[in-house]
Image (tube, grey):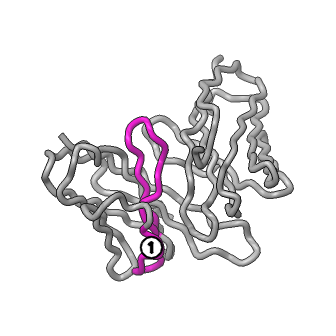
Amino acid sequence: RKEVEQDPGPFNVPEGATVAFNCTYSNSASQSFFWYRQDCRKEPKLLMSVYSSGNEDGRFTAQLNRASQYISLLIRDSKLSDSATYLCVPRGGSQGNLIFGKGTKLSVKP
Amino acid sequence: EAGVTQFPSHSVIEKGQTVTLRCDPISGHDNLYWYRRVMGKEIKFLLHFVKESKQDESGMPNNRFLAERTGGTYSTLKVQPAELEDSGVYFCASSQDRVAGLPGETQYFGPGTRLLVL
């Protein structure tokens, strides 16, 4: 089983749409969780941390279900600039390293 | 504030040659990480420095890879001798010490070094 599993997409959506990404992780010792976005040929950039109670940052909402080892990201009112690959990233147990999935590609069309 | 910088941005070398990659973390960040993405695969952890000490090097693929962080500032990653399968993008990231009570420190990534071994 892969450490992080994500639907690779691509998700092709019109501007203004709501889109949801899901992710499962295998390391039950993971304590911290993040969503990063990565533009083509660029470095990953932190989108948001994911807290146990779920959290919202503008148009973005992240949810964590530790029992199911499941993380989600909801994007409302999609913008063209949201087009990118979204990476679900748990942090490994007591270690500092991040564990990356292959990411989900989002393409927002006019 | 300057972000994480990496040098060179690109490197093309022949199999058997040596290449040294450099990473300058954000000033004041004690934690420095190296990651790598080979084509078609996900980004994978290589190693983690805390200041000048190797905290975790479990991701280093083999003994052809040598990472150093003398003085606890910038870090170098040397590949010697390079093999074809070493081609990929090498990312460096840095973070501050974890603050008690917070879910985890944010890692800031550099732009990466694209390595091609021919």
Residue B22 is one of the magenta-drawn residues: no
Residue B39: quarter of image: top left
Which sits in the foreground, B22 or A20? A20
Q: Chain of mark 1?
A: B
**Residue shown at the point (57%, 34%) measured from the top left:** A84
The answer to whether A89 appears left or right of B34 in the picture is right
Which sits in the foreground, A34 or B109? A34
Q: Residue furthest front?
A: A1
Q: Residue flagged by tag 1: what amino acid is it?
A: Phe
Residue B44 is one of the magenta-drawn residues: yes
Q: Secondary structure at mark 1?
A: strand
Crowd tier of the residue under label 1, counting other residues whose Cα lies within 10 Å: few below 14, some 14–19, many 20 or above: many
Task: Estimate the x, y position of residue B81 in percent, counting from the top left.
Answer: 17, 57
Task: Estimate the x, y position of residue A30 in percent, counting from the top left.
Answer: 67, 61
B94 lies above or below B11: below
**Residue shown at the point (74%, 46%) measured from the top left:** A71
Which sits in the foreground, A85 or B18? B18
Instruction: Work out which quarter of the rendered image holds the C terminus of chain B and state it.
Output: top left
Residue B63: quarter of image: bottom left
A93 lies above or below A49: below
The part of the chain drawn in magenta is B32-57
**Residue shown at the point (41%, 46%) measured from the top left:** B37
Task: Estimate the x, y position of residue B110 in percent, counting from the top left.
Answer: 44, 55
Task: Estimate the x, y position of residue B102 in percent, counting from the top left.
Answer: 73, 70
**Residue shown at the point (71%, 22%) measured from the top left:** A15
Can you identify the residue that label 1 sits on? Answer: B49
Q: Residue furthest right?
A: A53
